[in-house]
Image (cartoon, grey):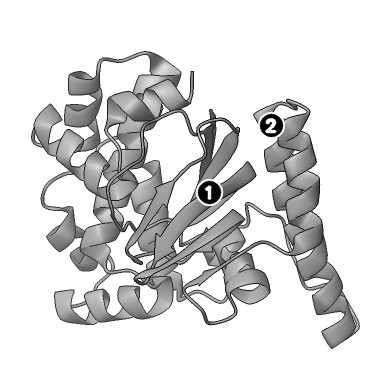
């Protein structure tokens, strides 16, 4: 399993998840065709790119390795996927040359880190070249560029920074963050949804899940202790959220990363 600021990458080793939607963008690549159902249409393909909050279900080919990417919708990588791959659509596939290269990597048993590096690096390179052709100069920054370095309202960038830096997301964050930024709650919620693309309540849930996973995977904490520290009311609340967000249980998620 690879856990980075803007994405989680793991090999699919779980049983087929139920139909679900979540706040992360989804990229899947398999060495053999799998069935992906999105927006009530099913296709057999070797790669899929799915927009956030789109109902989908994947029936993987259990005889073939599959890499799964969950991508933070507030990240620069998410913007690149919108611009370079989805282009206004909710569902698509990787460019054929990228797909073929990734299939070879999976078939050859290359480490997940190499798969991640190739996909993200290639997308960044294509985006950079496109920007240079359009503007005559590179305007593309690092993949981990923060929201405050992009065309983001400084108050929303500060809200994201506060949430990212805190160890625990308190239950009153929905009310306290707007006050800290000297904005009315209604104005802040509208501005956040406009600039980030998801509502603040769902963003807080996403970050609680992320913080819980980090504590379990990186610090070796128990699921219960990690969930409470991150801001969930209980481990069962976390389990329900994880199932809804990822389509699989956290236990299966951990198995996929083993």
Q: Position of residue 188 (x, y in %)?
A: 25, 75
**Image side of residue 70 versus residue 237, left or right:** right
Inspect this view and state whether residue 142 appears. Answer: yes
**Dot placed on the residue nearer the N-terminal end, 2 or 1:** 1
Q: Residues within 10 Å of mark 1 (few under 14, many from 20)?
A: many
Query: Dividing the picture into quarters, in which one does residue 218 lie?
Result: top left
Residue sitting at x 41%, y 56%: 24
Q: Position of residue 14 (x, y in %)?
A: 39, 30
Q: Position of residue 33 (x, y in %)?
A: 60, 49
Front residue of this view, candidates 178 and 62: 62
Q: Residues within 10 Å of mark 2 (few under 14, many from 20)?
A: few
Q: Circle 2 — which element? A: helix
Q: CA distance from mark 2 to mark 1?
A: 22 Å
In the picture of the structure, the residue carrying the numbered disc 1 is: 34
Front residue of this view, candidates 224 and 140: 224
In the picture of the structure, the residue carrying the numbered disc 2 is: 113
Q: Position of residue 186 (x, y in %)?
A: 16, 80
Residue sitting at x 30%, y 24%: 251
Residue sitting at x 77%, y 36%: 105
Q: Circle 1 — which element? A: strand
Inspect this view and state whether residue 150 appears. Answer: no
- The number of callouts visible is 2
| Contact check, label 2 and label 1, Cβ < 8 Å | no
Find residue 127 and name its label. Answer: none
**Image side of residue 158 versus residue 115, left or right:** left
Foreground disc of the pair 2, 1: 1
**Image side of residue 136 versus residue 203, left or right:** right
Residue sitting at x 49%, y 18%: 258
Query: Dividing the picture into quarters, in which one does residue 93 lie?
Result: bottom right
Say if 135 sits above or below 176 in the image: below
Front residue of this view, candidates 211 and 41: 41
Say if 205 sits above or below 105 in the image: below
């Amino acid at each position: 399993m690879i856990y980075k600021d803007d994405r989680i990458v793991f090999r699919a080793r779980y049983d087929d998840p139920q139909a679900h939607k979540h706040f992360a963008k989804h990229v899947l690549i398999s060495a053999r065709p799998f069935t992906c159902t999105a927006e009530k249409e099913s296709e057999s393909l070797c790669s899929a790119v799915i927009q956030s909050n789109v109902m989908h279900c994947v029936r993987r080919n259990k005889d073939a390795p599959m890499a799964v990417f969950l991508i933070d919708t507030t990240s620069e990588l998410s913007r690149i996927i919108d611009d370079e791959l989805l282009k206004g659509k909710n569902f698509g596939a990787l460019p054929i040359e990228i797909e073929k290269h990734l299939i070879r990597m999976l078939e050859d048993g290359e480490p997940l880190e190499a798969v991640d590096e190739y996909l993200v690096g290639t997308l960044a390179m294509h985006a950079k070249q496109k920007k240079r052709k359009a503007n005559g100069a590179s305007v593309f920054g690092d993949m981990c560029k923060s929201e405050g370095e992009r065309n983001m309202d400084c108050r929303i960038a500060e809200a994201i920074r506060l949430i990212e830096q805190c160890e625990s997301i308190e239950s009153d964050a929905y009310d306290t963050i707007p006050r800290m930024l000297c904005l009315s709650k209604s104005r802040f919620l509208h501005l956040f949804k406009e600039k980030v693309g998801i509502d603040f309540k769902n963003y807080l849930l996403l970050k609680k899940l992320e913080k819980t996973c980090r504590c379990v995977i990186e610090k070796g904490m128990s699921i219960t202790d990690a969930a409470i520290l991150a801001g969930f009311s209980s481990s069962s609340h976390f389990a329900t959220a994880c199932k809804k967000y990822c389509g699989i249980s956290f236990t299966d998620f951990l198995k996929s990363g083993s």
